Image (cartoon, rainbow, N blue to C red):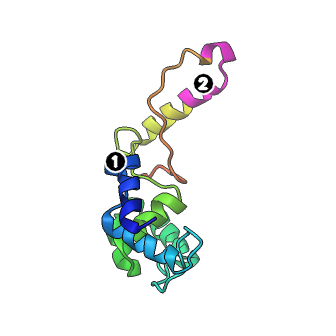
């Protein structure tokens, strides 16, 4: 079978989802020269150096010191790309932005006490009563700790 015949067969079978003419000719040539695998071959590329254990620990430390730090600030401080900083935060550490509406960051002591009281009441509830509690969508937060900066006057 010739390469143009293979291209026609792929186009008839897959329509608009078929490989492009250039890709078909490239693959055809590779297999004609003896290639037997469809897996990607090893190639010379830059190794991923930004997402490593050292930078992951640094990002953890930065976020634990200032929970309002931005991805751009983390990237700038560590000298890595914004994409790498985001990948460390989101993919490796499992962090994500949470809006203030869902998780208030600044609570005064009375609000904290009220939340504690409500949580204790809910923990002591019977299993039958718990099914009637209505909650908002789930929000996952990595090691979240409420910050307190309100003056008590």
Location of residue 137 in the rendering, given as x and y in whole percent from the top left corner: 45, 32
- Expressed as whole percent of the image width and height from the top left, the position of residue 56 reads 53, 71
Residue that numbered label 2 is attached to: 122
Q: Is residue 84 left or right of residue 39?
A: left
Of residues 32 and 55, the one nearer the viewer is: 32
**Nearer the observer, 13 or 89:** 13
Residue drawn at x 38%, y 71% is: 25
On screen, residue 119 versus residue 111, left or right, reads right
As for residue 123 lying within the magenta part, the answer is yes
SS label for mark 1: helix
Image: 127 above or below 55: above
Give the residues drawn in magenta, as a range.
118-129
Mark 1 and mark 2: span between their CA atoms? 58 Å
Q: Could you classify mark 2 by the number of other residues whose Cα lies within 10 Å: few (under 14), some (14-19), or many (20 or more)?
A: some
- Residue 153 versus residue 42: which sits nearer the camera? 42
Q: Which mark is residue 15?
A: 1
Name the chief secondary structure element in magenta: helix
């Amino acid at each position: 079978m010739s390469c143009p015949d293979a291209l026609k067969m792929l186009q008839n079978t897959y329509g608009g989802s078929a490989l492009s003419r250039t890709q078909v000719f490239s693959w055809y040539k590779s297999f004609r020269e003896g290639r037997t695998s469809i897996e990607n071959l090893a190639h010379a590329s830059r190794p991923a150096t930004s997402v490593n254990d050292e930078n992951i620990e640094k990002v953890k430390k930065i976020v634990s010191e200032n929970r309002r730090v931005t991805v751009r600030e983390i990237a700038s401080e560590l000298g890595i790309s914004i994409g790498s900083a985001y990948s460390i935060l989101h993919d490796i550490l499992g962090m994500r932005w949470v809006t203030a509406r869902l998780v208030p960051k600044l609570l005064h002591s009375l609000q904290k006490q009220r939340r504690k009281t409500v949580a204790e009441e809910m923990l002591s509830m019977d299993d039958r009563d718990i099914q009637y509690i209505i909650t908002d969508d789930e929000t996952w937060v990595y090691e979240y700790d409420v910050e307190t900066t309100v003056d008590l006057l």
